[in-house]
Image (tube, rainbow, N blue to C red):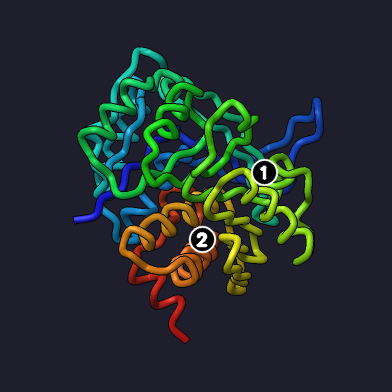
Amino acid sequence: MSTALVVGSANADLVYSVDRFPQPGETISAKQFTTFAGGKGANQAVAAARSGAIVDFCASLGNDSNGDFLAQTISENCVSLRHTRRSNQPTGTAIIFVNQEAENEIVLNPGANFDLTADDVQSAIDQSKPNIILTQLEITDEAIRQVLHSKSKTILNPAPFRDLTQFDINGLFAITPNETETYALTGILPQNEESIRNAANVILKLGIQNAIVTLGKRGCYWSNGVEELFIPAPSVAPVDTTGAGDVFNGALLAQLLRGNSFPDALQFAVAAASLSTTRPGALTSAPFAQETQQFLTP
């Protein structure tokens, strides 16, 4: 049976609902405060599991109440934690402001996430024997490098963005930058169809097999150098966009794991991400496969 390995971060997300973002030196009052399970790795692992994938999660949690909370929440969502270690560092946290337009600003403290080692990653790969690996950049360079060194079929979500020249990405199966990350990676801001294509071509010339540029409420673009596709996002009334990109990546992973084509997998992933923005939170906003399928059905 096909399995996925998600290598990444897990955080306790402290979410403040505000009318607007504060200016430097300004104090404002929040309308609501909630703690969610989050972190890009945990979000993507749960999104993949809810979309029907069998998922192992390789991560590092602190030996604290936040770590216990995350472990319980992630495992309750049918994600295996057999490759998740506990650290003496505090569990990672993220402070998130969400304004009335459902936009967000995030401050991240990596904590235990930066205790994940190359040996941890290689052990998870050796034992899981995954068909596809999904990873992000909220963990250490050595952990990321070990994933890429394995030459497994890997999807890289380059967020939060950092210089990728230090990693061997030649031959990488797929990369999923958003608009800001695409600009940082290529020097081209993906504003219109021509600039999006040009940016994707720069990515493909790096030796990456599939360039997937996520475009928020505009959907996404995919190219493998031979085929290309723009997939628009369905119109929704967003409540909270936090984690929508993670839902996209997790849902995409699940669909590719099932053997679906990129056009079908991307249509599903865009729908899942759009649906997630109609709910608060990150990890908890990920829809189940049946919900996404019903959302796609006219």
Q: Is residue 234 above or below residue 150?
A: below
- SS for dot 1: helix
| Residue 259 percent across, percent down from the top left | 33, 65
Q: Residue at the spot x=60%, y=70% of the render?
A: 229
Say few, some or many: other residues with alpha carbon within 10 Å of mark 2 (under 14 / 14 to 19 / 20 or more): many
> Is 124 left or right of 143, judged from the image as shown?
left
| Residue 224 percent across, percent down from the top left | 56, 60
Q: Mark 1 points at which residue?
A: 181
Considering only order in the chain, which callout, 1 or 2, is on the residue closer to the N terminus?
A: 1
User: Which one is in front, 23 or 92?
Assistant: 92
| Residue 5 percent across, percent down from the top left | 32, 42
The amino acid type found where label 1 is placed reads Glu
User: Which one is in front, 158 or 245?
Assistant: 158
Q: Mark 2 points at which residue?
A: 273
Q: In this view, does 98 lie above or below 95?
A: below
User: Which one is in front, 180 or 142?
Assistant: 142
Task: Count all numbered tags in the image, as a single digit.
Answer: 2
> Is 179 left or right of 51, judged from the image as shown?
right
Q: Residue at the spot x=47%, y=87% of the render?
A: 298
Cβ atoms at labels 2 and 1 below 8 Å apart: no
Say few, some or many: other residues with alpha carbon within 10 Å of mark 1 (under 14 / 14 to 19 / 20 or more): many
Question: How far is the residue under mark 2 from the one under mark 1?
Answer: 18 Å
Q: In this view, does 44 lie above or below 50?
A: above
Marker disc for residue 66? none
- SS for dot 2: helix
> Is 8 left or right of 277, judged from the image as shown?
left
Question: As drawn, which residue projects farthest toward the bottom?
Answer: 298
Q: Residue at the spot x=54%, y=24% of the render?
A: 109
